[in-house]
Image: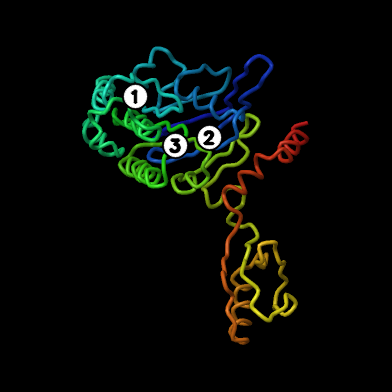
């Protein structure tokens, strides 16, 4: 079976602005794929091309086996995809149930209206007018409209903006459940935790190009990067007494960097046991997804890419 989304050598210009420069990636069926990038990086343009809202200048784009730029198959594509955009036009004087039921009528085999309302956490608000909903409740309604058609591919653009922590985690579980039942998800988000928790794979776009791709755990070499071991300096101990080199931070915690964290931890914990002390607040981590993302999209990284291209 071919991939759900195939993008090769995608280009788009707006006058003198080259917004998308040879973007390429694939999304497998039943996968959650996150496309990350700063505002203006080309992320929205790429998504709009795949959704069929914008024509490309060059390259290949295929969504569920169809060309999103082909007008003749536009309706067939719309019946098979779901969209949760940042701004969704919804009639404010309809009720929640009327809104979802109306959208259900656009699809040949929609999901049950009441089931979907319950799935997105709007149960009990079926008769509430849209204009009376809170911002977070309206965003849940947007999500309901995205999944009511039982899409094979769901586009999510900042899906949990305005959600409180509980609502956000419920939405994440819904998205995982959709993935587990075969729905492919193409996601954009500025919440790195959201990408970390949801995505099977991640791509970072900067200056109109894909600059890194991988799983959230391996993106940008996270899995092989230098580990950071942090803990509080035991009372009555000097930094020089430790068996490894450490740096005392402004927060009062020591940081030890190591390419072999298991060995370093063995040295530290063995030393602590011999001296009858405790390494309070001991943590071990590698650069977070957010740190890697910020490095890949930084002005310094952009300068390096420009020099390499030149």
Q: Position of residue 288 (x, y in %)?
A: 58, 52
* Secondary-structure class at tag 1: helix
Question: Which of pointers 3 and 1 lies earlier in the amino acid sequence?
Answer: 1
Q: Nearer the viewer, residue 238 or 208?
A: 238
Please state the horizontal and vertical placement of residue 39, each as a whole percent of the image: 59, 30
Determine the residue located farthest toward the front in the rendered image: 132
Q: Nearer the viewer, residue 299 or 210?
A: 299
Q: Which residue is mark 1?
A: 131
Q: Which residue is mark 2?
A: 25
Q: Residue 17's x, y, as percent?
A: 67, 19
Q: Which of the image's four quarters has the N terminus?
A: top left
Task: State which mark lies toward you, 2 or 3.
Answer: 3
Q: Closer to the observer: label 3 or label 1? A: 1
Please tell me in which quadrant of the rendered image residue 231 appears: bottom right
Pointer 3: what residue?
162
Outermost residue, top side: 72
Please tell me which residue lies in front, 229 or 124: 124
Residue 149 is left or right of residue 157, and the answer is left
Q: Is residue 267 above or below residue 250?
A: below
């Amino acid at each position: 079976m071919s991939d759900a989304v195939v993008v090769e050598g995608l280009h788009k210009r707006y006058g003198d602005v080259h917004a998308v420069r040879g973007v390429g990636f694939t999304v497998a069926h039943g996968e959650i794929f996150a496309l990350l990038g700063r505002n203006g990086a080309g992320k929205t343009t790429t998504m709009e091309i795949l959704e069929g809202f914008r024509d490309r200048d060059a390259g290949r784009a295929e969504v569920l086996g169809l060309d999103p730029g082909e007008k003749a198959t536009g309706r067939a594509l719309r019946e098979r995809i779901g969209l949760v955009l940042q701004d969704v036009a919804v009639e404010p004087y309809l009720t929640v149930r009327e809104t979802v039921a109306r959208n259900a009528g656009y699809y040949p085999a929609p999901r049950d209206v009441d089931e979907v309302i319950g799935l997105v956490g709007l149960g009990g608000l079926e008769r509430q007018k849209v204009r009376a909903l809170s911002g977070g409740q309206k965003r849940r309604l947007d999500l309901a409209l995205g999944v009511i058609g039982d899409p094979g591919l769901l586009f999510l653009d900042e899906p949990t903006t305005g959600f409180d922590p509980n609502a956000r985690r419920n939405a994440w579980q819904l998205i995982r459940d959709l993935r587990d039942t075969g729905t492919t998800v193409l996601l954009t988000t500025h919440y790195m935790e959201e990408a970390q928790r949801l995505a099977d794979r991640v791509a970072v776009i900067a200056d109109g190009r894909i600059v890194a791709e991988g799983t959230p755990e391996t993106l940008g070499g996270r899995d092989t990067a230098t580990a950071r071991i942090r803990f509080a300096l035991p009372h009555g101990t000097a930094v020089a007494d430790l068996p490894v080199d450490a740096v005392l931070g402004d927060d009062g915690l020591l940081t030890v960097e190591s390419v072999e964290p298991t060995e370093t931890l063995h040295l530290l914990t063995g030393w602590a046991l011999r001296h009858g002390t405790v390494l309070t607040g001991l943590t071990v981590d590698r650069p977070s997804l957010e740190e890697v993302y910020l490095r890949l999209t930084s002005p310094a990284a952009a300068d390096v890419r420009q020099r390499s291209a030149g």
